Amino acid sequence: MSTVTPADWQTRPAPRTAEEWIARAAEVAAVLATDAAARDRAGATPHAEVRLLKDAGLVTLLGPAEHGGAGQDWTTAYRVVREVAKADGSIGQLLGYHYLWNWAARLVGTREQWERIEAEAARERWFFGGAVNPRDKDVVVTEDGDDLVFSGRKSFSTGSRVSDVTVLEGVLEGTENHVFAIVPSGTAGLTFHDDWDNIGQRLTESGSVTIDGVRTPWSSALGYVGKEFQPRTYATLNVPTIQLVFVAFYLGIAGGALETAATYTRTKSRSWLHGGYERAVDEPYVIDTYGDLTAKLWAVEALADAVAAEGQKLHDDPDAVTEQARGEFEVRVAAVKARATDVALEVANRVFEVTGARATSTAEGLDRFWRNIRTHSLHDPVAYKRREVGRWVLEGELPQPTWYS
């Protein structure tokens, strides 16, 4: 059990380096781990957990240093998400989605827009949610003088009731032009429904949302100048960036499953009565399984870190991002997403083989790791990720930017 409290973070110097921020994330994870299984069973709205992220400074990790942010990059953000997800996959997902939606202004908006939004978000420690589920019928956006009016419904809105601001997306009426805008989550007409009741990621507040005449100034439409959208190839990095967020919390959840199981094996598992060993940790098949799963997890973590570093080079020079560079990066992201999904599911499933029947107790909560990965990994079919890689290998075909590639 961690002895770190939020009060300690207020009195200690703020982390400065990437390594120090990852260590801070590990401290947050230690706090979350003390009652993670109980909170998963309760499924309560995670207001306290988001407050913990804010108190620890993780919410403003990507924010500009001159406005109170940490000024870190995406390679650090992914590692931070991975650490938090080791203790609580739901909170890891919330944090990762927050980073993406916080970055949406920079991806899509004009320089003036994203500089203003990032500065205010860092100063006010905004926590971002997003109502941008592409599988739903598009939200309709209409003009009313100098305002835009969003109306429709989205079946998923991760972070909804714990967010300070929400990213909205819709199609401008009479056109095929998509519009993104960031509005306060308490805006009139924005109603979050308490209907997220899935087997995993239970604390992500991913229920549906009704958007009934939500008004925002035309000036808040990201990337629009004089009511005309200014396209950039960099804007299409939204998908590979969020897919790497998925990879980060899948690997974090898998790592948490492995660590939790190993502790159980060391302290609670009984050796098999016919195996000839007094301790479970001495049984060859137990040792082999932990070695096998750890090697697989380490390998995909290394690939994830390498792909994240490749992506950071694109984030460092947005105006230089070409369709070719973006496509090659997406292929690499697709590859690590496929491997992370397979390995994480295997780890979360096979840990039961080396913990035993008593480890299935609800009180242990070991099942939450598998439930969390299984639930979110259905976000988009992993077979299509493998197809992206295969088409590139065989034909040199680059994935075309879509909501999922």
Image: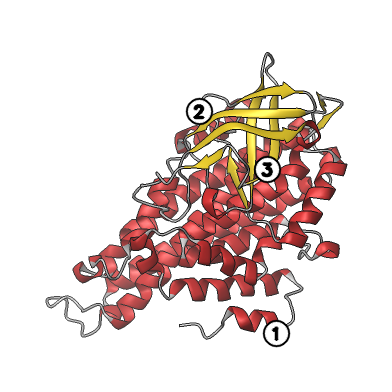
Give the mark nearest the N terminus, 1 or 2: 1
Q: Residues within 10 Å of mark 2 (few under 14, many from 20)?
A: few
Q: How many marks?
A: 3
**Residue depicted at x 72% and y 35%:** 216
Instruction: Examine the rendering and report whether any part of residue 396 can be seen.
Output: no
**Residue depicted at x 42% and y 71%:** 259
Tell me which amino acid carries mark 3.
Val
Q: Is residue 101 left or right of residue 320?
A: left
Q: Are marks 3 and 2 in contact (CB under 8 Å)?
A: no
Helix, strand or loop at label 1? It is: helix
197 to 24, vertically: above or below: above
Judge by depth and name the residue closer to the eye, 350 or 11.
11
x, y percentage for residue 347?
Answer: 38, 59
Tell me which amino acid carries mark 1.
Thr
Q: Which residue is mark 2?
A: 136
Q: Residues within 10 Å of mark 3 (few under 14, many from 20)?
A: some
Q: Quadrant of residue 79?
A: bottom right
Helix, strand or loop at label 2? It is: loop
x, y percentage for residue 64?
Answer: 81, 59
